[in-house]
Amino acid sequence: MKQITLLLAIFAIGLQSLFAQAKVMTGVVTSADDGSTMPGVAVLVKGTTIGTITDIDGKYSIKAPDDASALVFSFVGMETAEVAISGTAINVSLKPSLVGLNEVIVVGYGEQSKRDVTSAISSVNAEDVQKISVANLSGALQGTTTGVQISQVSGAPGGEVSMRIRGATSLNGSNNPLFIVDGVPVETSSTLSNNYGGQQNNALSSINPEDIASIEILKDAASAAIYGSRASNGVVLITTKRGKQGKAKISINSYYGIQNPLKKYKTANYGEWLKYGDDSYAEAYGAGYWSYYQTGDESLWGATDETLASFYASVADQGDNYIDKIYRDNAAVSELSGSISGGDENTKYYIGASSFNQKGMLLGQDYKRSNFRLNLDQKFNDKFRSNVGFALTSENQAVVNNDNNIYGVLSTAILEAPGNDIYDENGDYTSDVWTFSNPVQNALENQGGLKTLRLLTNAEFQYDLTNWLTFSSKYGLDNLQADEKEYDPSDSSSGSGSNGYAREDVSTIRRTTTTQAFSFKPIINDDISFSGFLAGEYTGRYYKYVRAATTNFPSTELKQVSSGSTLDEALGSYSKTNLYSVISRVTGKLFNKYIAELSMRADGSSKFGPSHKWGYFPSASAGYVMSEESWFDVKPINFFKLRASYGMTGNDSAIDPYTALAGVSSTPYAGTSGTAITELGNVDLKWETTKQLDLGFSVHLLDNKISVEYDYFNKKTSDMLLNVPLPGSTGYTEIYKNVGEMKNTGHEILLTFDIFSQSNFSWTAIASLSTLKNEVVSLDGNSPYTTGFASRVEEGVELGAFYVLQSEGIYKSDDEVPEAIASNYGVGAGDVKYVDQNGDGLINDDDYIIGGSPWPDFTYSLKNSLKYKSWDLDFLFTGSQGNDVFNSTLQYAGSTSSVWYNKFVDQLDYWSESNPDASLPHPKSSTRSYNNKDATRFVEDGSYLKLRNVTLGYQVPSSVFNGVADVRLYFSADNLLMITGYSGIDPEVNYSGDAAVTKGTDFLSLGGAKTFKFGINVNF
């Protein structure tokens, strides 16, 4: 309600502009290329927010104040023209522009012309992000640039995402990039201490996409090394909107949409499940045993095939379809946002507010977000100025046991034995018939919730000491408070054993940053220029966490922790880390064609011992604009630049604040309390260090109709932090050490095409292709290991490659089974045929191989933007080729898993004497476990092509609103099409979030959503 009130107030302020005195200016805009008229050109009164666009004939009419000095004409791909007002008619001809090269982009601790950039930096167009109205920033970045992979870890609203820039650099630490918002590092670690239902929140969801002015992704070490020990995984720079000089500009955006799953699981009905059980136990107990065991009908045990078939058909529809019951149809998503900005020569302001609501695709999932932002720029005099930012975000996430969790709502609906009704004849939940739990009751009664409040502020003060030397002092605060609750009533399966259970976790994370810097840009001459800065910085991180949990509740109506009579848990933790830094950078340019940049950052961290507190992270880069040479006369090429860079970055996220120190805890002995060392410290721990080489070029062709950006990178991480096992004789199990190396190499190419650009119609396209090769080079003699389900860490192998047995179909007859395999495991016709790699007659650890990799051979995208008169159409395809997925969902609910679990429909075509050509193994009880081993039959090709987004917009003619308002209506759809051979829900999976080692594992995941939205943009 508060957000709606604010937006109405903003709207009311905008109406004041209607009563100002004005004169009507008219004219025609044409193209300098061919003289054709140009519709859709933006016409703005200079120094104001009064504007309009040209109509289908290139004509415009605008009311300009009497004191207006000029009109500004702008159009994508054309040079902006400013024309002084003289009379009441102005005709103008626009020239093509050198697209992008004069654009100023944000870099670490500063700005730089895109033409002069010598490192690998990708820019994401904020206008494109806002045009498609994404729910959160992570969705906006998918498929929009090279070298970046984003996957949804959880399908829950506001759920966690995984983001990788040029592969992985750490075995145990974070592999997500560093996020900087208006110069302030943002906390992206999970605030959930218990991760109820296996879920974690998405820190990026707290940023309102409508407030974003620009996004830059620093991919190589030369651009990222300025952030030193936190930049091994790349850096994402987010700059929010600020006010501009002129009258108040009002913007309002609102949309409403619906969501449905990309795909639903299809499970067996009651009759099919009983047949599976009968087939499983037929060899041991005879026909119909499982049906008798489940129903108590003795006539079924030993019955004929015809009798059993008739019985299966008669009970096929018994019970509810749990999958259908837990999904919402057309789950709603909506947002209302607005902003007001403006100012004069000395004071500029931007105020934004939004309210976002999203229903989850599963019952019990809801997400609400409210944002408020104030950015204020003040010029006190010609030398002293300041800019201040204040952002407040409130999030309320209703959390249920969800995907990626065997006890979640989705998993219980999949695995729970069919044949039961959700409600009894009285409308109450059925409770005593479930193996796991009643899925609907699990969703609606087992309550979990996460509330977060984030305050993000920054203040910078700048003073010009001379015309080339400036001192700045900057302060940043990211304060995040989280309150997570869980309640399992006594009449639920999860709470019945303890007569009800309640838990509450409260955590606070506070990150403060202060930076004192001198920046310089001396004036030498037109041929020589250089600039740089020298800074000192402090970053402190404070973390506090408290938990309380109780059981034995007197009533299901009392749900607070304080209502439980038995204390189950009472614990907490506290930590504080400090990071002191010295930062420098120098950039030089000679004759407008030779460009060089050097940077150095020294970080001192409290996480490490005295000998290794400081890490040093240098970088160097150079660029050569060959097209500026007098001898360069290649007519198709308008611009050509070579780039090279090398640098070092670091990572300390793999260890806790006090890992270098010995851990001490209370240890009672002989009835007396005392303390003992329970965890060994290691004062010799040091930074994980990544060294990266980048080679690239930029070229513009054919009068800038085509541009090409290419990069090759070689990225090597050493001194990886790993928990290493210790001999039992030490009395301890493990200790952290710096061990091993990992390497990532790849190629990236980005192509931009200005296919057609005329007055009535324009068409641009952007295509990207990225390759990546990952390898664990060395573990320093430590043993390889498998984690997650089948993810392997081994020298010479890609990180997280799938370590499995090689399966080659099934044995069609007993005669095909080797004698040793038959005698050792009781294997016969219908069982899985594993390859005995060493021929010893055993199927054991010696027979496991690398059977697939989650890393793709290449990823790609294609975006098209078309505009015809008042209509615009954008669509984005993204794809991945050559990556594998380990389908652990299929392993759990497949034809050879537990007889108690339900099965997928397409897993019921298994081998039997009457079905000898089937490709799936027989579910007989004696070899069920043998047939369900981690094997290549669960490794599937995860390649895919998705139509990620389609947006169709219509610019309402300005004459409809008498030139007062600029109105655009639009329809947007996400994930309209998915082409893949993967049998699961969605091949874009990573069940364990930030852990790169478990990339590509699908464990009962919910998958993405197909979304349709209708919206309106209004600007005054």
Image (cartoon, rainbow, N blue to C red):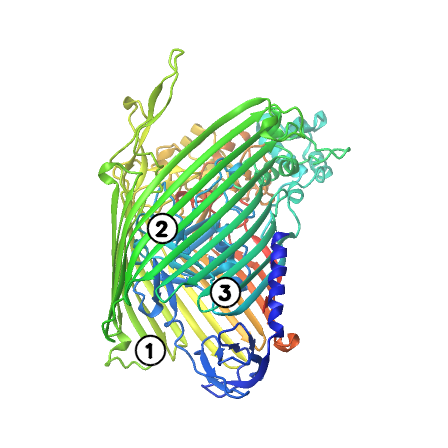
The mark nearer the N terminus, 3 or 1, is: 3
> Can you identify the residue that label 3 sits on?
128
| Residue found 45% across the figure and 55% down from its top | 389
Q: Is residue 635 above or below residue 7?
A: below
- Image quadrant in which you'd find residue 963: bottom right
User: How many C-alpha atoms fall within 10 Å of the one at disc 3: few (<14), some, or many (≥20)?
Assistant: few
Give whichever of 732, 934 is nearer the camera: 732
Give how far across and how far down residue 8 sits, in percent.
63, 60
Which element carries disc 1, helix, strand or loop?
strand
Upstream in sequence: badge 3 or badge 2: 3
Which corner quadrant of the image does residue 149 belong to?
bottom left
Residue type at mark 2?
Asn
**Residue 134 x, y percent position in the rendering:** 54, 58
Asked whether residue 162 appears in the rendered view, the answer is yes
* SS assignment at label 3: helix
The reply to whether discs 1 and 2 touch (Cβ–Cβ < 8 Å) is no
**Residue indicated by mark 1:** 637
Q: Mark 2 = which residue?
A: 233
